[in-house]
Amino acid sequence: MMSPAVVLLLGWMIVPLAMTVSFSFLNYNLLSPGARTWAGWLNYEFFVTDPAFMIAIVNTVVLVGGVLAITLVGGIALAVLLDQPIWGRGVVRLLVIAPFFIMPTVSALVWKNMFMNPVNGLFAHAAKAVGLQPFDFLAHAPLASIILMVAWQWLPFATLILFTALQSLDREQMEAAHMDGAGAVSRFYHLTLSHLARPITIVILIETIFLLSVFAEILVTTNGGPGYATNNLTFLVYAQSLLKFDVGAGAAGGVIAVILANIVALFLMRMIGRNLEA
């Protein structure tokens, strides 16, 4: 019964991947689409030796690592906070998860024009109110600004997963530890944090897979600049294919990106598998 859906899904994935692999071995430029000649491995060599390639790899690692750090620390803190018997907890929960349902393009435009604008942005007005000079985030700290935007949107996801897992924590165990003299820090480290170990690994896996392909926030705010400051691997493939019109080199970059993403996913799956078996 599932075979038609499986065949459709495989076709949906395999056909574009096969076309990308075939394009990666051709001299294929959009300015002369009819002239396609065999290039062999030259497109791969050209893409890997591009000075922007290593910068894009480093930016991708920094972006993924920065967003994971913010979302995990913030997600744990918010999950613990939402688990407390506070007034209006239902409304607070709804507000916390709301950013996850905003489109990345809309989120980037809001951050760019309403918060980080050095003239009319909220941060600029706050700086002027306390006598400070407004700071141009996207010009002087572009990658950190992108990390902040993406982390703001992924923080609700981490919070929701961790908060759901926190609901299954044995309250009697927490009360017993409290009666035995364990402090708040000890209870959090030995009970809460250890209970969240498996959900944390799931959050790391899912977020990493999606964060490797961050694109909309970069395109809308910095367009990869200044220079190559916010170029990640996904944006580099886009720039090579649609800004420089070199589909062959862009396709080679896409294949490299897929290979690297699968290596990371396999590594994380093995790490999570050992964690779940423990």
Image: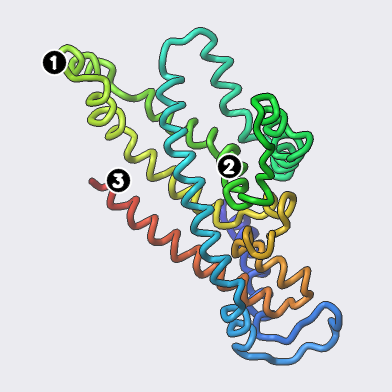
The location of residue 166, given as percent across then percent down, is: 37, 26
User: In the rendered image of this protein, does residue 270 appear above or below residue 191?
Assistant: below
Q: Are marks 1 and 2 in contact (CB under 8 Å)?
A: no
The residue tagged 1 is 180
Q: Choose the circle earlier in sequence order: 3 or 2.
A: 2
The kind of secondary structure element at disc 1 is loop
How many marks can you see? 3
Of the residues shown, which amino acid type is indicated by label 3?
Answer: Leu
Whichever of labels 3 and 1 marks the residue nearer the N terminus, that label is 1
Q: Name the secondary structure under disc 3.
A: helix
SS for callout 2: helix
Of mark 1 and mark 2, the one earlier in the sequence is 2
Residue 276 image label:
3
Where residue 262 sits: x, y (%)?
48, 64
Quarter of the view holding residue 54 = bottom right
Q: Nearer the viewer, mark 3 or mark 1?
A: 1
Q: In the figure, is residue 14 to the left or right of 190?
A: right
Which residue type does callout 1 highlight? Asp
Identify the residue under disc 2: 148
